Amino acid sequence: MTLEKNFEQFRLIIKTLVSLTKILISSNFFLKKPYTLKSDIYILGNGPSLNKTLDLYRDQLKISTLMCVNGFSQTKEFIVLKPKYFIINAPEFYTNTTDSNSKIREKTLSSLIGKTTWNLILFLPADSKKNKEFIQRIKKNNFIEIYYFNKTPVDGLNLINSFLYAKGLGSPRPHNVLISGILQAINVGFNNIYLLGADHSWLPLISVNQLNETLINQKHFYDLNTSKPKTMHKGGHGKRKLHEVLEKFYFSFRSYHQLQEFASKSKTSIINLTENSFIDAFKKIKSEDHFG
């Protein structure tokens, strides 16, 4: 048993050293971050359950501090709720990758830039600065203020991981935009983070067709009746096979547990208000009990 523990400790140390090397190579050490005087933030994922949530609690959310993600800017709710924060973390948005979701990403950007008529803080990955055309396009809207974050994935010793998260130098593997959103909300200084529309209920929606292509129907609240099963691409480098899809989900769900551990150390409470959410890392409260 002692030998196993020693081997595990050695393995974590090696992972930490690899992570620190990644930080030195990939992370930006001079990024500014916004701060807040408010205690609570609601992060709206785009899961199917958000339809019901908005129907019931739209008025409460309109007067709350909100962070929205990805395709939310395409919806009519974007200009109704006027979120204070918005986050994008997929490299496909700023690397000109062409795949089946290209049109969706373009619509997301066009809507974000064209519809925002209030002060909005936009979080973008630090490496997006390399695409000057992409950044200048966003900066044409003077209401949008950009803050950059490092999405360099780190692993290894928990103490070192938490230090890197707090300094904004690294992240749990950011395979889902919600992971990046939660980390930014912690580091901005919110005491209570509430999650809505964080269904993450994709597992029953995976299938494999006769061509051995792995398909997944990633439904959102805004395309619940039109969404169709699609292959999952890996950054423009082909289609993910079943084991690669499951691996991506594994890292995503593990990242939430890492965020929960970091949140506890940061004295931050993360509450999942999403009905039937698959995320098992955060305390769950029924939305009706929270909103009253």
Image (cartoon, helix red, strand yellow):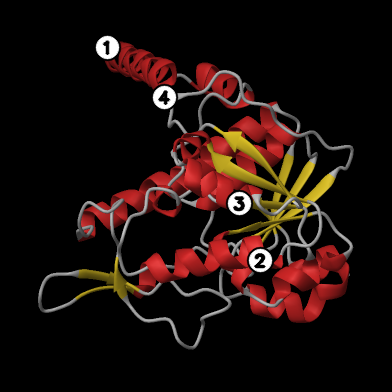
Q: Nearer the viewer, mark 3 or mark 4?
A: 3
Q: Nearer the viewer, residue 173 or 237?
A: 237
Q: Residue at label 3?
A: 138
- The crowding category of the residue bearing disc 2, from other C-alpha atoms within 10 Å (few below 14, some 14 to 19, many at least 20), is few
Q: Residue at label 2?
A: 114
**Is disc 2 in contact with disc 4, using a CB cutoff of under 8 Å?**
no
Q: Nearer the viewer, mark 3 or mark 1?
A: 3
Q: Residue at label 1?
A: 3
| Residue type, numbered disc 3 | Ile
**Residue 14 occupies quadrant:** top left
Q: CA distance from mark 4 to mark 1?
A: 34 Å
Q: In which quadrant of the rendered image does the C terminus lie?
A: bottom right
Q: Earlier in the sequence, mark 3 or mark 1?
A: 1
**Residue 207 occupies quadrant:** bottom left
Residue 155 appears in the figure = yes
Res 96 label: none
Residue 91, horizontal then vertical, whole percent? 41, 47
